[in-house]
Image: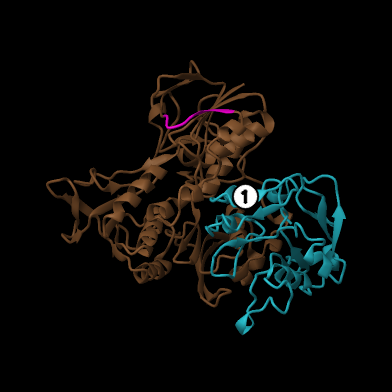
Amino acid sequence: MKYVIIGSSAAGMAAVKAIRARDAQGTITLVTKDATYYSRCQLHYVASGHKTDAQITLAKPDWHTQCNVAFHGRTAVTALDAVARTVTLATGTVLPYDRLLIASGARSACPPIAGLVGHNSFSLRNIEDAHAINHAVHASTAVVIIGAGLVGVELALALAAIGKKVTLVELAARPLPLQLEELAGALCTAMLRKAGIDVVLGQSVAAVERDAAGQPTAVTLQSGARIPTQVVVCAAGTRPNVDFAAQTGLKINKGVVVNLRCETSLPDVYAAGDVAEIEDTITGKYAMSSIWPSAVRHGTVAGTRMAGGEAELDYSTSMKTAVSISGTHVVSIGMVTNPEPAWSKHVLRGTNSRGEAALRILYVHENRLMAALLWGDVSNAGVYTKAFVTQCDISQDVDFLGDLDAAKFGPDRVPAPRAQQLVL
Amino acid sequence: MRKKAIDRSKCRGCKNCELACIAVHSAGTTTHTAYAAGMKTTERARNKVECDPQKKNFPQFCRHCDEPACVEACTSGALTKGADGLVVCDHDICIGCYMCVMSCPYGMARPSVQTDGKMIKCDGCRGRDAMACVAACPQRCLTAVEVDDPKDGHLLYADEPAAPNACRSTP
């Protein structure tokens, strides 16, 4: 059996492990733009110099050799031929496959802002980006970060911690607009400002001004405001890496459409991680589930099935993540940011084990947990996640919503996973 | 391999298991040293006695699942499942992203009470002669059993059949 895996991050590595757990003999070829195996969630620490490459490594550089995997590092895939069952690499090599996994991830989006592309203007997605930012901020005092999503906020905090003057510009009215509602958004803004970050909300960037040498001098906003800076980082969303598959008949919406078995519309072609788009088992809408845990789960399911095993995602949701803001931990589950009017909102205030303020915002509808935002105390967050993804009846627990316990979810109270067949 | 057998009908909710867990994982490994100034515990218990819907005590422990959601969620590579079947956290690697805390359906991947913000979880008392919680249980609700198969998690509940995949099933 010839396996080809595109991408060596969370999903790709998980798939290799899953295949090798079942098939020691098959030929696995790993094609990746990366040169090493590293934790993408820690790139902001490398950008700020808090951590070295070695400290965020996930496996030895020769991990593929240990797994008996042929490795094509720093190599892009240029074409997929689903009829001939081959992928073509930028090097010209043509690899035949019996089973293909597309785990090519995503890249940073580049919004059409005048002057954005050029010297000392970065995004943060790969370790090369982190190195470039780290190099640039050594010689600079001011940094403007466009976009206060997870990447923007974590990078802003890391750069503020090394004494840089950081301005964080966000189009929405609050930071982490996909994770926080108004109340927590205000708390987050206050924390970012306390960390020394200049937070500019409800503003979009009009242009990046550059001097004659092409170096950034300032960022101008639509409001006309001008923020002097030497470094610009754009953290305004991502786009899945699907270019090589565009002409193949592979069903692609935003990402490669897969079912809960990570199967695409093409036979023996699977997709996993940030490149995959799956029907959200709670909302019924197709969405990306771009967090590390999802990518590992996808990769495990895809790899298991590619090697002839049985596996399926028990749920998929694009809406859950955990983030730390200056040591305050936050878990956001469900459509916290855009609740349905019918949902009842419960705001519970308390303290965590260190005596710090904690907040739990829970949305409940028809005895089901529709969304939860845990701020400051995230212990038992997994139980809230479980209540959300299984959409089980929590009527007996309404009094305990502030402290859901796993024991309250007996086997009889968890509905069977919804049968789902991808119609293509 | 050593597993923990639980007969929850015997649990009186005394929480000695929680206290023993706090003590054994604190610096001095005694209940006296487990408390810092202000009588705050220096460690959080890695287990918890909960109530089930029938209001009966339910001692909740890490199952050391065969497909551990915490390990799948770990962004730093700190959480691993060893050959002995135990899922443990390497605190030198853990960055406290708490994706595991968000993902464990039993709430047994827990935030540390320390300011380092790392995760803590049951280590099965690997390297210790006895499991602290088991040794401290006065009701014999918790007992240690030796089994050959490290599969099917780390826990044996007396009143339910062993699930083929402990993590994806429910208590």
Q: Residue A203: x, y in percent? A: 25, 59
Q: Residues within 10 Å of mark 1 (few under 14, many from 20)?
A: many
The amino acid marked with disc number 1 is Val
| Nearer to us in this view, B147 or A99 | B147
Residue A387 vertical placement versus A238 (above, below): below
Question: Can residue A74 be found in the magenta stretch?
Answer: yes
Tell me what hue chain A is rendered in.
brown
For the N terminus of chain A, the image quarter is top right
Q: Is residue A290 left or right of residue A136?
A: right
Q: Is residue A10 left or right of residue A215?
A: right
Query: From which residue to which does the magenta span run?
Result: A69-75
Q: Residue A100: x, y in percent? A: 53, 27
* Residue A54 visible in rendering: yes
| Nearer to us in this view, A160 or A246 | A160
Q: Secondary structure at mark 1?
A: helix
- Give the colour scheme of this rendering: by chain
Q: Quadrant of residue A411?
A: bottom right
Chain identifier, cyan in the render: B
Q: Is residue A105 left or right of residue A70?
A: left
Question: Can residue A405 be found in the magenta stretch?
Answer: no
| Nearer to us in this view, B50 or A19 | A19
Q: Which residue is mark 1?
A: B71
Residue occupying the point 22% across, 57% down:
A229
Q: Quadrant of residue A17?
A: top right
